[in-house]
Amino acid sequence: MMAFAGKVGHGLAAAVHHFSSMILCVSLAAALTGAAASGPASAQDTATGSSAAAIAMNDAMQESFQLRGALQQLAAELPTLPGKMAATLRAMSPDGSLDWLWSALAVLAAALIAGTALQALFRRWAEAVYLHRFPPAPETRAGKVAFLLGRGTVMLLELAIFLITAWLVAVLLHEDLHASRVTVQTGILGFTAWSLIRLILFNIIAPDTPACRMLAFDDQSAARLNTALVTGLGLSAFVISLSIWMRALGLEASAHKVALVFSAALSTCILSTIAIVWRKSVGKAIMGGAPDESAVHPALHFIASIWHVMAILYFLFAFGTASFRILLDRPFATGLVSAPVLVLVAALLLQAVLMLLIDRLLPRLDTRRAKAVLMDGLARAETAAGEAPDTTANASQAEAEALEAEAARAPYRALFDHGAAILTLVFSAWLLLKVWGISIHDQSSILGNLVEVAIVGFLGYMAYQAVEIAVAQAARRDLLRPDASTHAPGEMEIGGTGDSRLSTLLPIFRNFLLITIVVISGMLILSQLGIDIAPLFAGAGVVGLAIGFGAQTLIRDIFSGAFYLIDDAFRKGEYIDIGSAKGTVEKISIRSMQLRHHRGALTTVPFGEIKHVQNYSRDWAIMKLAFRVTYDTDTEKMRKIIKKFGQELLDDPYYGPMFLDPLKSQGILSMEDSAMIARVKFMSKPGKQFELRKVVYAGLQDLFEKNGIRFAHREVTVRIADAGGNLVPAPTPAQIASAAAGAHAGRAAAQAGGQGQDPQ
């Protein structure tokens, strides 16, 4: 046995010799890279840069020599490692035997068995009490997360019961020997740590509950990946616990370093193997389990295809760094290889908690439960009105209302989800840096400033997106108004109803708020980076004063526009006349607006040049129509016809809502040489008067023709005098008809005579 151990020791010594050469090369390359990167930025800093490079080179060389010496010493002591371990174990016994070890292992086994048995009893009771509180297939992600977190909490209680029971059994059965206490304590804590890792992975991967699984794994992949991770991390935890146990028993520091390096190498091999074997399954989970990979974002698809390569490179780099720190007694030497796994677990737990909070604050409104509540409210309303509830109609209405409410809430939930993802990513980076021993709280380092910069940037980004969503939601609600304008540009009649005041002011408020957020965030970021922003404010004041004197017209335009908008003088989409131009308001900016004439011309008018505004699109419009009738018209009959026609238009389902006051006759307005001028009027909604004018004219023409009322046409009457100067009386209708008949007969006879002649 000792001969075999000696051969193993010599083999390890050779391996360590080759590894020492690699570490030396890496250290020297890092030193040279650091020296090159710290080169001078200007001619004045040449001496300082050269000095820093020389110091960095000197430190790298010293570390290389120290590392080589440590590796040589370690390689020389490796053949005696098994003997030292055995001697350490025997030195713990008063009589030099290993009987204490077997006794300690028996106590440890009894403690683990007792704790596991009581844990199993508690699990059986807890599952019966806990599982029935949740549906078999939760409908929302909040239900899934709540189930997994609740089950994880129950399993933590089980683990606490195991730890307490095992500890009590160990206290009752242990021998009064330091080595025995250390052995039992290390074994119980190591097994508890492995059990903790197992329960966390079990609830994250959820191999037994596909309905609650948050990661996009199929059942087979989830079960196998969970087994592989639990086995690999358990083996690594066992090796680390073994090295800690031997160190606590008094093993020499050099042998303890070998054990730590071996545990890091074992973790590297296990995690790299898992990354290679499960690269496709994890890649699909990264893409969210999308069946069509072409629909996945290219960046996400790229990460899913190379994640295992990046992971293996990290494991190798972490193993080299950990070995370097272990051999040179540097801090933060352990846990570097497995740090991404632990960070990922912590990040997923944080993400789950944040998702649960978001869904509690902004629950989904289109679930079956929410629809049932809406249906119940509709049924109660119908019952209170004395009607029988219509289940089918209520279900359809509840479905529509739930979808509409969820559509309004979904953007805010998506924003909070995005913010939670950013916070989780930042937390993961912070935790990983902490494991590596890199402090981000040191204000003298660039990382310390970047933390504050990241916080300000995150808050500014969230505020920016919140304003965008709020404005978009307000504009959407405004468009859904029953009286909202639906005309496309160029299609609206003159004087038609424009947009609401909200839709007119929203773009201006949006730009103002977004600019304010960007400016404040930028100022705070500059301040956190150490830039004094006080001179910027002073300079801005001077520049503002100069601009104020040189741009008085611009300031007048801005303030005039602000007061016009406050007074609600016009809105987007309204037809206005400002004297120098008229048209539909198409665009409103800070200093001007654009008017689209009904013939298509676009006029840009600064607010400061507007003296008065005549708005054709407000409240109501009166249309007065005049027409000419003959002197023999019965005005009373005409009035009754117009009144009846006005009532018919008012009752029309299409034209009736356009009227605010029905069509009325205003009688005879004036009398001219050959006609009486009659007039009608009506009041309508803005922009509808022109459409109604066409209907009124067409209807009056048809009704007058049916009732014998003739329009008076403009005509010229010629009077002929005879030889004595007397006017020839106008022919009667009978004479006109007789003359017309004679003329017709003459034309017929002429045509007949022409046809009877022979051609020459």
Image: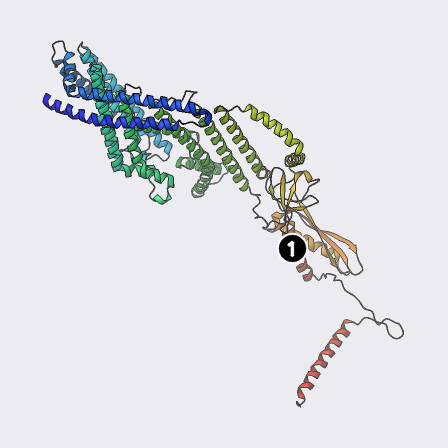
| Residue shown at the point (33%, 38%) measured from the top left | 304
State the residue in front, 178 or 165.
Answer: 178
Residue 685 percent coordinates (x, y) = 64, 46
Q: Which of the colour schemes (rainbow, by chain, secondary structure, one colour) is used?
A: rainbow
- Indicate the quadrant where residue 18 lies: top left
Circle 1 — which element?
helix
The reply to whether residue 338 is visible in this rendering is no
In the rendered image, residue 619, in percent from the top left (x then y), is placed at 65, 42
Q: Is residue 262 left or right of residue 519?
A: left
Q: Which residue is mark 1?
A: 694
Q: How many marks?
A: 1
Q: Quadrant of the N terminus?
A: top left
Q: Residue at x 37, y 44 (%)?
A: 295
Looking at the picture, tell me which residue is in the foreground, 203 or 517. 517
Rendered-image quadrant of the C terminus: bottom right
Position of residue 601 relative to residue 719, above or below, is above
The front one of 639 and 205 is 205
Q: Is residue 101 visible?
A: yes
Using the image, determine if residue 619 lies above or below residue 205.
below
Q: Which residue is found at the position 40% from the left and 24% from the top? A: 50
* Residue 631 quadrant: bottom right
Q: Position of residue 147 (x, y in %)?
A: 33, 29
Q: Say which amino acid is labelled 1.
A: Lys
